[in-house]
Amino acid sequence: MAAETLSAEQTPERLCDLSADARTAVLLDAAGSLAGSTESDPERSEELASLARGLFEAVDGAHSGEPAEQIEAQVPGGAVFASRTSRWTLAVVARRQALPSLMLYDLRSVLGELEGGPRIVIREAAT
């Protein structure tokens, strides 16, 4: 049986299912438009999308090299992580104790799934 293809609308929820530290996530398309969100409130979804766009604009404007592929921002109440490809930007608000390397790995993996890559298998801990 073929694995189900991940849609843009499903992608933020997939990330939150994959990572216990993820609180909420948004997906933007190449034009910067909201393509998916875990938020039920459309205004909150748009606000998070705007903040994700602003993070990348600020980072890209701060240095003259290649555009950033990923961002990590720590704040007193949590953390924000974001990763992008040429087609998608995925951003997540996470708990403060989230491990950056794992969050960024999860972001890249879910973006890979969205772009047709292999699906990550979530395994339950053995009891």
Image (cartoon, rainbow, N blue to C red):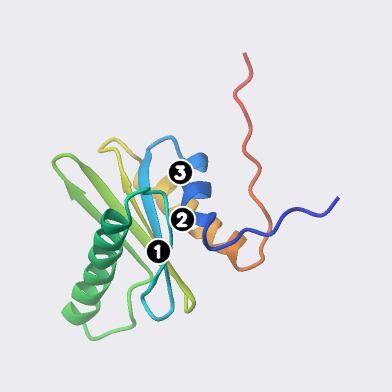
Residue 71, percent from left and from top: 30, 62
What is the distance, in whole Å, between disc 3 and disc 1 at their CAs?
Answer: 15 Å
In the picture of the structure, the residue carrying the numbered disc 1 is 83
CA gap between label 2 and label 3 equals 10 Å
Is residue 73 toward the left or the right of residue 84 in the image? left
Q: What is the quadrant of residue 90 in the picture?
A: bottom left
Q: Which residue is mark 3?
A: 16
Q: Earlier in the sequence, mark 3 or mark 1?
A: 3
Q: Residue at x 24, y 60 (%)?
A: 47
Location of the C terminus (image quadrant) = top right
Label 3: few (<14), some or many (≥20) within 10 Å?
Answer: many
Number of numbered discs on residues: 3
Q: Amino acid at mark 1?
A: Ser
Q: Which disc number belongs to residue 36?
A: none
Residue in the picture at 61% in, 27% down = 124
Mark closer to the observer (3, 1): 3
Q: Secondary structure at mark 2?
A: helix
* Mark 2 or 3, nearer chain start: 3
* Element at label 3: helix
Q: Secondary structure at mark 1?
A: strand
Can you identify the residue that label 2 sits on?
107
**Mark 3 residue type:** Cys
- Residue 74 on image: x %, y %: 20, 49
